[in-house]
Image (spheres, rainbow, N blue to C red):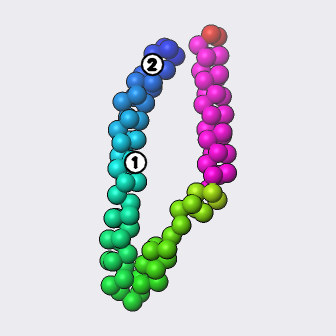
Amino acid sequence: MFGSAVILIALLLFLTIPPLVVQLRGLVEREPEMRGQAVELLQRSSLTYPLAEQLKHLDYGERLKSSQTTVLSATKRAFEILAYLSASISSRSTS
């Protein structure tokens, strides 16, 4: 039973991760164009003009540096949870 679940999850990951990566790559490639359109739209209103200026000068490098620690700790925690679940499922199946 556990082996079947692992195989099913691996198959689902194999089928979903590659299309997700392709979509993310497309978004990254189109980001400057999409950001420009968003800035143009936000500059039309005096209420959203300051937001447009912030978006125009947004530096992703600084954002990524500040979030790197958070992402790493969340990834570590996710692996800990998966290991715990795996251990508890395998101990139940041997009991």
Question: Based on the displayed image, in which of its 4 quarters is residue 38 positioned?
Answer: bottom left
* Residue 95 position in % (x across, y down): 64, 10
Question: Seen from this angle, which residue lies furthest top?
Answer: 94
* Residue 16 position in % (x across, y down): 38, 34
- For this view, does 23 lie left or right of residue 56? left
Q: Residue at x 39, y 89 (%)?
A: 46
Question: Seen from this angle, which residue lies furthest bottom?
Answer: 46
Using a 10 Å C-alpha cutoff, classify the residue at mark 2 as few (fewer than 14 neighbours), some (14 to 19) or many (20 or more). few
Residues tagged 2 and 1 counted as in contact (Cβ below 8 A): no
Three-letter code for the amino acid on which mark 2 is drawn: Ile
- For this view, does 31 lie left or right of residue 72? left
* Residue 17 position in % (x across, y down): 41, 35
Q: Residue at x 60, y 63 (%)?
A: 62
> Secondary structure beneath disc 2?
helix
- The total number of labels drawn is 2
User: Which residue is the site of mark 1?
Assistant: 24
Give me the C-alpha separation between circle 2 and circle 1. 26 Å
| Picture layout, residue 83 above or below residue 32 | above
> Between residues 90 and 10, which one lies in front from this camera angle?
10
What number is the disc on residue 7?
Answer: 2
What number is the disc on residue 64?
Answer: none
The residue range painted magenta reads 67-93
Q: Residue at x 37, y 54 (%)?
A: 29
Three-letter code for the amino acid on which mark 1 is drawn: Leu
Q: Residue at x 46, y 73 (%)?
A: 55
> Between residues 22 and 87, which one lies in front from this camera angle?
22
Callout in the foreground (2, 1)? 1
| Picture layout, residue 3 above or below residue 48 | above
Asked if the magenta segment contains residue 23, the reply would be no
Using a 10 Å C-alpha cutoff, classify the residue at mark 1 as few (fewer than 14 neighbours), some (14 to 19) or many (20 or more). few
